[in-house]
Image (cartoon, helix red, strand yellow):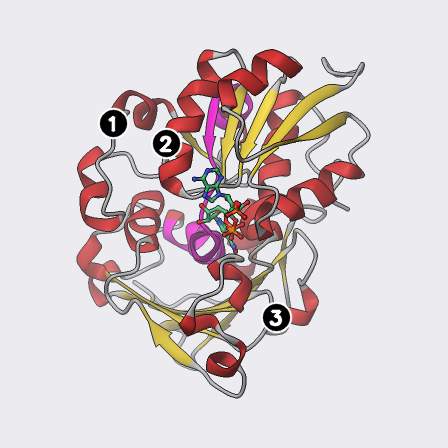
Amino acid sequence: MHKYSQGCKAGVAGVSGYSGRELLRILARHPGVEAMEIPRESEAGAAVKEHTLDIVFLATPHEVSLEAAPAALAAGARVIDLSGAFRLKHAAHYDRWYKMRHTRPDLLAEAVYGMPELDRTGIAAARLVANPGCYPTSVILALAPLLASQLVDGDAGIVCDSKSGVSGAGHKPAAGTHFSAVQENFRAYGILEHRHVPEMVQALGVPFGDFQFTAHLLPVDRGILSTIYVKLARSASLEEIHAIYTARYPDGGFVRIRRQAPDLHGVQRTNYCDIHVTLSSDSRRAVIVSAIDNLVKGAAGQAVQNMNLMLGFPEDEGLQ
Ligand SMILES: NC(=O)c1ccc[n+]([C@@H]2O[C@H](COP(=O)([O-])OP(=O)(O)OC[C@H]3O[C@@H](n4cnc5c(N)ncnc54)[C@H](OP(=O)(O)O)[C@@H]3O)[C@@H](O)[C@H]2O)c1
């Protein structure tokens, strides 16, 4: 029996948005959690006290999370923030990438980056979890095992070409995500300026100048497909590479190593990340393809996976 066998109380801020709505949908079928909405007009700390919340999900813009997370923590709750407000370790990076002055470097130091497959112990003990971004989830999970194996020739650079469905932009209408702007269309955006780049570089421990990332907008509702190109430091067999990935992501988890290149249909509305690696005939170049649902493994599903680790539930509770 886990600590919260009597039921744990979770509050969700941002429920009119795409990620907040997805969180409520997942938490509704979680047997150990009673979930409630934190209305836009409520102050997070007051909501924690009034409803004696154990944990708070912030599915809000980063400026909102920057204020709400400290308030919820001070009121005694643990916090999982889905925004980028606590993902980067250096406050100065927020000036450049988020156009925001970060006022809580102490919480940047404390926050644990919430990628369960890479840091279960850290997440389980955390008071504040910075839930990863959607593109970073697809890229970091795809690259981390290969980088850790020292097989990547870093000097040759890493190229990531990622494509997302329109729900990645949130529920607020905008000219660039209007139906007529998106359907039958396909375009790159944020070239060399995407705010997920420092997050990926930080999590992967690669030099900024060796890492290229371009985001694209797909004319679909949900899903991210990333195609990643790396040069290997030495030739390697597909069996060796497969063994590296399956050691990091054993069968039965949410990261599945596939024998064929994944697609969006295989992961939509699931918490899975599907990954496939192809080797060139000289065994010196690898192309890694990964697919996730941006609102599930890229946001709400991963947040619940983190909550499960923090509160001692089975990691996949509510997510199957
Ligand atoms: N969409 C994705 O694929 C995805 C993936 C990973 C992470 N994220 C991150 O998760 C967060 C939520 O993303 P989303 O796509 O779900 O956004 P969204 O659809 O735009 O929803 C944002 C939510 O925040 C609320 N909100 C906006 N301004 C507020 C304020 N000043 N005070 C209180 N609440 C406010 C909105 O309420 P109103 O409806 O009243 O405006 C809405 O409920 C963002 O930080 C985003 O970067 C998104």
Amino acid at pointer 1: Thr
Ligand 1 within 8 Å of disc 2? The answer is no
Instruction: Say which residue label 1 marks.
Output: 103
Q: Which residue is mark 3?
A: 262
N-term-proximal mark, 2 vs 3: 2
Which quadrant of the structure image shows residue 258? bottom right
Q: Which residue is mark 2?
A: 66
* Image position, residue 291 (x, y; %): 56, 64
Q: Position of residue 199 (x, y in %)?
A: 33, 47
Magenta range is 122-147
Query: Where on the picture, by quarter, is residue 54?
Result: top right
Where disc 2 sits, the SS reads: helix
Dot 1 or dot 2, earlier in sequence: 2
Give the class, few, some or many, for how many residues have Cα within 10 Å of label 2's Cα (few <14, many ≥20): many
Q: Which of the two marks, 2 or 3, is nearer to us in this view?
A: 2
Number of marks in the rendered image = 3
**Spatial CA span between label 2 and label 3:** 36 Å
